[in-house]
Image (cartoon, rainbow, N blue to C red):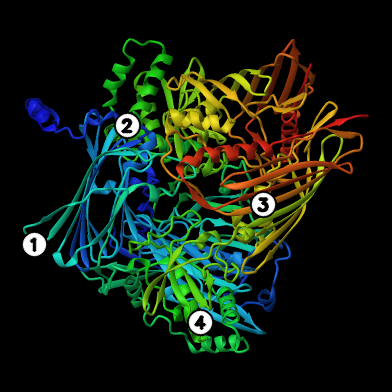
Amino acid sequence: MMKGLLVAFLPLSIAFVALGGDEKYPVSEIPEALRKDADAVVRKEEVVFTILSKGRANLRTIEAITILSAAGKRKATQFLYYDKLEKIVSFKATLYDAMGKEVKRLKSQDIKDESAVDGSTLYSDQRVKIATLTHTEYPYTVEFEYEIDYRYLYSMPGCVLGVERISAQRVSYQLVYPKELVPRYKLQNIDASPKKETLKDGKERLTWEFSDIVPLKDEPHAPYDRERVSMIMAAPRQFEYDGFEGDMSTWESYGAWNSKLMVGRDELPEGVKSKVGELTRSMKTTEEKARVLYEFLQNKTRYISIQEGIGGLQPFPASVVDATSYGDCKALSNYMVALLKEAGIKGYYTKIRAGEDEPDLILDFPSHQTNHIIVAVPNGSDTLWMECTNQKSPFGFLGRFTGSRHAIMLTDQGGRIIKTPSLPIEQNTQFRTAQVTVDAQGNASAKVGTSYHGEQVDNDGLYERATGSTEDQKKWLQDNTEIPNFSVTGFSFTADRKKVPSVTVKADFTLNRFASASGKRLFLMPNLMNRMTHIPDKVDDRKSDVVIYSNFLDADTVIVTFPEAFHPEFIPPQMKFASRFGEYEAAMVFTEGRVVYTRRIKMWKGRYPKETYNELIEFYKNINKSDNFRLVLVNKS
Amino acid sequence: MRFWGVCLQSLLLSRPTKPQPVMNRKTPMLALIALWLSTQALAQKPPIKYGDIPMEQMQMKVYTKDSSASAVILADYGESIIDYSSDNFVIRFQRIRRVKILNKDGYDWGNLTIQLYRDGGKVEDLGNLKGVTYNLEGTKIVETKMKSDMVFKEVADQNITIVKVAMPNVKEGSVVEISYNISSPYLFNFQDWNFQTTIPTVWSEYRTRIPDWFTYKKFVQGYLPVTVNENKTEHKAFNIHTRVQTGQSLARTTGVDERLEYEENYNRLVIQDVPAFKAEPYITTYQNYISRINFELSVTNIPGDKWRTFNSSWEDLNEDFLKSETFGGVVRGSGFLNDEVATLTAGKTDPKEKIAAIYSFVRNSVEWDGSYRKYSDGNLRQVITAKKGSSAEINLMLVSMLQKAGVTANPVLISTRDHGFIRRDLPVESQFNYVIAAVEVEGKTFLLDATDRSLPMSTLPKRCLNGDGFIISAPGKSGWIGLSAPKSKTSATTELTISPDGSMNGKFQFSHDGYFAQRIRRSYYTKGKDEYVKDVASSYQWEMQSSEFENLDKLSEPVKEVYQLKLAEHVQVAGDNMYINPVLAHRVDKNPFQAEKREYPVDFGSAEDYVLIARITVPEGWVVEELPKPQALVMPANSARYTYNITQTGNIISLTSILNINKALFSHDEYVPLRDFYTQIVAKQAEQIVLKKK
């Protein structure tokens, strides 16, 4: 069909060429279906990744994207990162207008070249080239064409189809490799086998081609996008990185390669060796020894991000950390393992994908997927965990940053998959008792005591603040107290540094106009500071499962005292409901001249079928409604 | 014979972002090289000696003047002198910083970042970088020296190199001392000094020694008293040894010794017990409030060279900008724009029409690249071709085209909100970072900025609203103009009917102008209509039935939004009572000012009005039992006002709720009344209507 059209219009297109250059990517050729829910349309994406040898590769990419509106503008900028083992051979950026007429090409001086150090990193040897194209009228099309030479083979670019608000018209992805270096690949949500060819030079080529891919729909409470998109992942089998050869086919062999980078880097100077002896001599159990060494590490070192060499994968030697008393996660974890070793304890350098909002490892596809290192010490049936970059975190506690996910432990037998702990609901709790005294004008004072346990100590960095300055603590209180008007008159924070840590926050408030006084009535919300404000949006034709990411239990008791002349005119009804996602219960009771409000909510972590989404909305709606109930007091005098 | 022309090499090195027209004169190279041997007698002992740490600093556990401090700068001492070396004047800067680390949150103060300029081949030279971490072990002070592998150098871009030092062995209780020198050939880049930072400083001192051949304008800003401000002039002399090059080789020279006298201006500034700077909401920029001193090269009067001025009065500065090829030149020149101007203004006689036509042409043809500039980087033809430009390029083009159309138009230099306040007693160009346009119509002056595509022509972007701007005009006609924006207004009108089950149905109509309209336009176009409407519905918890928009593209008109909706959960039904909060939009549900007191002004950016007019119909069979009382709140001098008026006629309840913020800037003295004002608004807007079943 397309071909026929081209032939029919050939004379015309020649005329155009003669007049004003060739037209590429006219916007009129985008099918209507691809413009729906899209800010940008990938018109053409061609990726060719060629493995040249165990330690050399090449990437050639052409990507043309039509920017439909301002919201798609970020796609008009292309970042190419590089370091001393990666060379950007060419980088072209061309702008076309809606008709497909070339407007401009960036010259090399228009492409910025900057060091790729972000705000939280002290030093990195990575640099970045940035090409930005912009046009005054939407839509327009940008085309980036580039080639990168890799003097190593380690991670390989994949192919991701249809992310949020971006559709794709034509995508091709090719892997070229010598027969003896067949790469591995994994398809997710794609059911397409590649075309396989043998090229003249004897190399083999796998080709996937896709067309007309609609954007991924944004769905609240869905699994991570990473899991929902269609994609191809690729990784080598044999590879070589800066002189280190390895095999990535299994987690065992991948881990073994990573261990090679660390050979000889665990030597400790004599001084610290005797210090380890001194500290652990009187200790009996592995746990006691590990704890004292962990605390030694926390007191001795500080975290500084330094990304240098071998893609930022090789730790600084333990002796360097000993001398400088700082390092990044690799260096500090490696140092910790060395300290443990000196005390006769086997600790493992463990690779993990950290972050409160990060998907888990794709277990059936060994490849570079991690961004952080922690230390694991098997201890009988238990495992002791150590986050070495934080000088304050409690021994054995991982929290939301690295807890409850898979990790790769580097053992003598190679990499081994292990799961970090997930705390049961009974340990992720928040208990609160508040005494509120309201006067006839509606002004109130409140004494509030709240204890947070387990993962809840990570609420807006509470644990960090609790162990920080009073200034920080006050700021935390001000940011996390959901009362319309309040002044803090006194407060205290106490952190309990246990394996399942807790923080107790006590605060006194004066609440200006806490109750709304209208004539002879006082209106007030007894749910002082734990109101649900979120209701998930309705979604038509929901595609993905419903996911609740964390377990928790909150229990609040608020005792409201008011002047004798007032009596409840309206006490909202007790609410109690349960769903597959959790349980909720709230009640107000008038007793001994006071109103006692109790609220208890439990949420279960889990994954539920997509059909349950409306139940989730209903559940949240009911909670919202109950949380916003007002108590009405009326002056009878 | 003295030939000092060689020193001008250093003056010729100018910052690329700061072209200074006076520097563009060519100077003949002279085959004369002078060695300048200066004798620097120190009048006053430095406040700290490197490596000499008193025991009480080691033993310090808490900084008593601020017990919340995680680290404290014990002393920060810097000195800048102007010296002569290798055929050039250089600024020699040296600094010693000693920090006490009090707890783990202060560990980052074990690092130091130094920024160096370079331009072409010449880099500012970092020298004698050294540092020691001192820890107390028992009664013994243990030293850990900085080594070269703890220094990281990073070429940030072509002009800036960043050196980062990470000191070893930093622990709770450490004293960390770092010292370094910078020698700079860039005389315009005299090191500024910040006395204040985010942790407290016990002693911050900066000394400068400048030969009277150089005049720098300097200004001290901040809310803190200066502890010492000592000025002295010393008569000094240099022994100059000149070598005259007699042949091809420098080796064969004849020496001439000479004594050259000058006055040295010495200044010593100290601020003691500097508190930590703490950020608060509604401030413009950190740089506006901390105590600091800045230097700007103003005049050089070097023996053997003529007197040179670098913007010593506003009138001079005006002339410099007029003369500058990248400023005035761009406006006067750019003849290629004449055709476009002729087309745009063809048939138009009213200057207002011409202005509107040219303004929309510039705004729609050139997209702002987001950069704040006061000089044009290239010529305007390139800008038109690239369809992208800086604030300077866009607005200088606007001025140029307006002038070509016969309209009285001039560029206006300003300092944006994040760049700091303008000081009118300091005529230096570095105070400005942005340019807009002023036009005169019928004796009135209007300000224009064509960089923003979501604001009407009459409203400057909020970033521009910062004190005064300086109009660059014909000699004698330059001057100041206040930067303000008309009041922005957002109003909502609603008609809702309550059903016996407590649900409400009806319609909302919004009208927004100024910055409110800008926000709506940006949000609408970024999210797209569906997403935008969805977010509106979810923010008010509406079930949206229909939505309509007007004037989204008509920037001169207010944006209008009309919604039909159902509110299921708003009314609380309690047996024979119903409770309703009638403030259904523009409600302040939390006081934005939580801190009890404040050190700095509150800056809203512009004056604002929030209006709600609601008509609520009571359901059949129900009567009004109680209405909130009307209330009016006024801040002193009517700087802000709130009125809440509620009445009942038959089964209709009418509410008018109006919040007027009548000025942009509230001083810190007005903070507490402002906070109370908001407290009362929050309380009033929480009040309920009570309905009773008949």
Secondary structure beneath dot 3 equals strand
Q: Are marks 3 and 2 in contact (CB under 8 Å)?
A: no
Marked residue chain, label 3: A
Secondary structure beneath dot 1 equals loop
Between disc 1 and disc 4, the foreground one is 1
**Of the image marks 1 and 4, the number of the one nearer the N terminus:** 1
User: Residue beneath label 4, please?
Assistant: A339
**Of the image marks 3 and 1, the number of the one nearer the N terminus:** 1
Task: Please determine whether, in this image, residue A52 is positioned above or below residue A318.
Answer: above
- Identify which amino acid the numbered label 4 is placed on: Leu
Distance in Å between CA atoms under marks 3 and 2: 45 Å
Tell me the residue at 34%/63% (across/down). Answer: A368
Task: Please determine whether, in this image, residue A435 is positioned above or below residue B198.
Answer: above
Marked residue chain, label 2: A
How dense is the environment of label 4, judged by Cα within 10 Å: few (below 14), some, or many (20 and up)?
many
Marked residue chain, label 4: A
Distance in Å between CA atoms under marks 3 and 1: 64 Å
User: Residue beneath label 3, please?
Assistant: A554
User: Does mark 2 fall on the same chain as mark 4?
Assistant: yes
**Of the image marks 3 and 2, the number of the one nearer the N terminus:** 2
User: Residue beneath label 2, please?
Assistant: A35
- Identify which amino acid the numbered label 2 is placed on: Arg
How dense is the environment of label 3, judged by Cα within 10 Å: few (below 14), some, or many (20 and up)?
many
Residue furthest right as drawn: A637
Between disc 3 and disc 2, the foreground one is 3
**Of the image marks 2 and 1, the number of the one nearer the N terminus:** 2
